[in-house]
Image: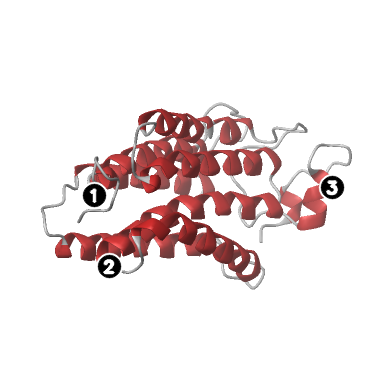
Amino acid sequence: MANPADFLMTDGCPWVDLRKWSGVPNVRWCEDQICSWIATPANTWSNLGYIAVGFFFFWFTRKEKSENIRFYGVAAQWVGWTSFIYHASLTFATQVFDFLGMFVFFYLILIQNFARIGIGACDRVKRNVWIWTAATTVVSSTVDKLGFPIQGLVVLLIVGILVTEAVASMRAKTKVGHRYFFLSLFFLGIGAAFSASDVTRKFCDPNDHWIQGHALWHYFGSLALLCSIFHYRQFYSRETGRLSV
């Protein structure tokens, strides 16, 4: 958990009561907080990238037969809005909510990979996403208090995605295209580098409420989400919507 002294605690400012009640997040980003409903403007408004991608997914999948592919729009909206609320408020409670949004999308990817391997049914992907998201969110709110950073769970999910993607690709009956998968990883890597430069203060201007390293993580992360749908779309029949690997 970060030092509460690093966060705005002025009585009368929005979110302060919730911040005092639930605690502060376990990370302090570079951007200075202001006494407003949008405590960190750059890190908050940059989540519009995820939300825009989510709306694109709704349009792109409007005639899609696969429920799993249609769910991408919902998942991207969860990522965008939960992160928006978190960075607007900067409380531990909304940080857990932020990770809930990320869990929805990462589990959508991971559980599809398990289905490609033959572990779990294609028509149960959405249900399993919600079950595992709920369970992991409960775990994350507990382990962070015990000293295990909540971000570690996301790292484990990403490792799981990489491993299951490799296994599923090796077992596939037809050649799997990986252009969009690697492009997604490329954008994710760039975004992670900017985010790391923010938290380590290598790229840091606290008074800049337009561009921050973590805000760039959101922009590049939204591009990673955008690429992911094109990778996973190849595994579904356009006629039946069934998983075909």
Label 3 – label 2 distance at C-alpha: 48 Å
Q: Which mark is residue 235?
A: 1
Q: Which residue is mark 2?
A: 118
Residue 169's quadrant in the figure? Answer: bottom left
The spot of residue 119 in percent (x, y) is 32, 69
Residue extending farthest to the front is 240
In this rendered view, identify the residue nearer to me: 120 or 219.
Answer: 120
Task: Work out how far the residue at label 2 is from the one at label 1, CA to CA, in angstroms.
Answer: 13 Å
Identify the image quadrant of the N terminus: bottom right
Quick check: can you spot residue 149?
A: no
| Label whose residue precedes the other's in the sequence (3 or 2) | 3
Residue 199 percent location from the top left of the image = 53, 49
Q: Residues within 10 Å of mark 1 (few under 14, many from 20)?
A: some
Residue furthest toward the right?
11
- Outermost residue to the bottom: 146
The amino acid type found where label 1 is placed reads: Phe
Residue 107 figure quarter: bottom left
Counting residues from the start of the chain, the first of labels 3 and 1 encountered is 3
Please rate how many residues cluster around mark 2, counting C-alpha atoms within 10 Å: few if below 14, some from 14 to 19, many from 20: few
- In the rendered view, would you say 128 is above or below 194? below
Q: Which mark is residue 113?
A: none
